[in-house]
Image (cartoon, grey):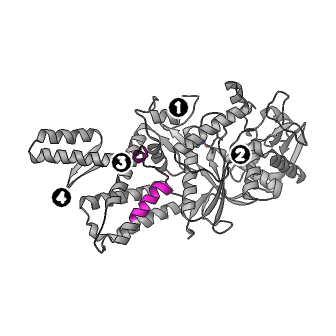
Amino acid sequence: MINSTLKVYNSLTRKKETFKSINEGYIGMYVCGPTVYNDVHLGNCRTFVSFDIIYRYLLYSGYKVRYVRNITDVGHLLDDGEDRILKGARLEQLEPMEIVQKYTNGFHHMMSIFNTKKPSIEPRATGHIIEQIEMVQQIIDNGYGYEKNGSVYFDTIKYANEGKGYGDLSGRIIEDLLNETRDNLKNQSEKNHPSDFAIWMKAAPEHIMKWESPWSVGFPGWHLECSAMSTKYLGNNFDIHGGGNDLKFPHHENEIAQNMGSCNCQPANYWLHTNMLLMNGKKMSKSDGNTISPEELFSGDSPHVTKGYTPMAVKFFFLQSHYSSPNDLTDGALLAAEKGYSRLMQANKTLEKLSTTGAGNSLDAEINDIIKGAFDDMDDDFNTPRALARMFELVTKINSLKEGHLDINQVSQETLDNLKKTFHDFLFDIFGLQDEQAAAGGDSKALDGLMELIIELRQGARESKDWGTADKIRDKLKELNIQVKDGKDETGWTIN
Ligand code: AMP
Ligand code: ZN
């Protein structure tokens, strides 16, 4: 069954729109991948985890998704005109391709730590030079590109004057674009207009990564790779294009111009942009020390946190804000996320053990409404914070059913089965969380057994009126954030 109620916020139209795929049941999705010249940072992780959840939800909704996420390994220049990969190679005294491999491996490792699914295709820019040269030629043939001294530039003025909408995505007008292009500033003077951008760059003799082309021995402009690779694997027009909102301009604006310039087609029907990860209210930035690496966050080895947080606690923290809102990383928010994550995992274990013999009735509609609400939230532009809040409404119900505040026999077998399945699916298939305790070697069974033993010992102490021992056990568990609850018939426990 394909979900037909999905709405997404389209950055191109600045509207929330009902999603309709080009081919029914199939989705083509392209997300700009990392430039692999240094370690992936937490901001990057936020963006890729967000698109992973979008990918997971589309798959869960029944679509066959071809998810293409590239690796940028050439052409992404720094403001001073140096290629990021070549700078990495220079600083670390490695081959450019060693830098690319090293940081691609690191990126993959981090993506697996965050339990994200691998994309269907992960093309590299250097593996698609021929396609990029062909696209430059098409752009020249169509009159939107011109050559100057071996470099080729995209003619933004001609394109804009034809009413093709240069600036539509980023909301900028052409006059504002002066001097704002990130590409080769050294060649600024040879452009016809400062907003024109390089699609092919002639390489200096000492430049290492360069290829033969009809115009010069050189290398492609950064924006070109995404146009060429999305077209190759998803066609001239595909469904979704994503990336961080810092890529709207110039990268995505220029991608659209290149696709329009080469085949007169809008590449993607829906443009989705993630917002930035902040830390303590400010943009994460290496230069002013307001930064933390994933490893520092996991180990707690940073002045910005009081302790280490597990990858799933961090992922839970990501889920708590909508992908298109800024997300502020603070120690307090992480502490709360850690608690929330562990309550969720604990509730799932509690739920697995619940059984009913009753015919159900009064609680069925309530539970099924919450479940439906969670799907509605995801259909509403993948609203994870609201869907997560629904999961916590279910956690309250689950704990009340366990403790007998709600009568389990007021829940039918069918509703209980639905609750177990959807709660599990949301946690593990849609949000892509993992039970870290269980993953650490089936510890959850051992923990359950240990807790049963401790509760029995405490019960024994209470029966023999050994209040000192009973209280000592309760207090020690409290220190560990484990709360013991004495019910009518049995004693339960939860991790807060
Ligand atoms: P880059 O490797 O710089 O090309 O970035 C890879 C992806 O991470 C892009 O989609 C960026 O928009 C995104 N990104 C970079 N910084 C942040 C941040 N602080 N928060 C969220 N996403 C980011
Ligand atoms: Zn891109």
Residue 492 visible to an observer of this rendering: yes
Query: Left or right: 128 with respect to 448?
Result: right
* Amino acid type at image mark 3: Ser
Residue 435 included in the magenta stretch of the image: yes
Q: Which residue is mark 3?
A: 444
Which sits earlier in the primary sequence, circle 3 or circle 1? 1
**419 or 161, nearer to the observer:** 419
* Amino acid type at image mark 4: Asp
**393 or 2, nearer to the observer:** 2
Q: Which residue is mark 2?
A: 251
Judged by depth in the image, the label closer to the viewer, 4 or 3, is: 3
- Residue 282: x, y in percent? 52, 36
Q: Are marks 1 and 4 in contact (CB under 8 Å)?
A: no
Query: Left or right: 460 with respect to 279?
Result: left
Which numbered marker is on residue 290?
1
Q: Marks 2 and 4, how far apart in space?
A: 63 Å
- Residue 240: x, y in percent? 65, 57
Q: Which residues are magenta?
A: 419-440
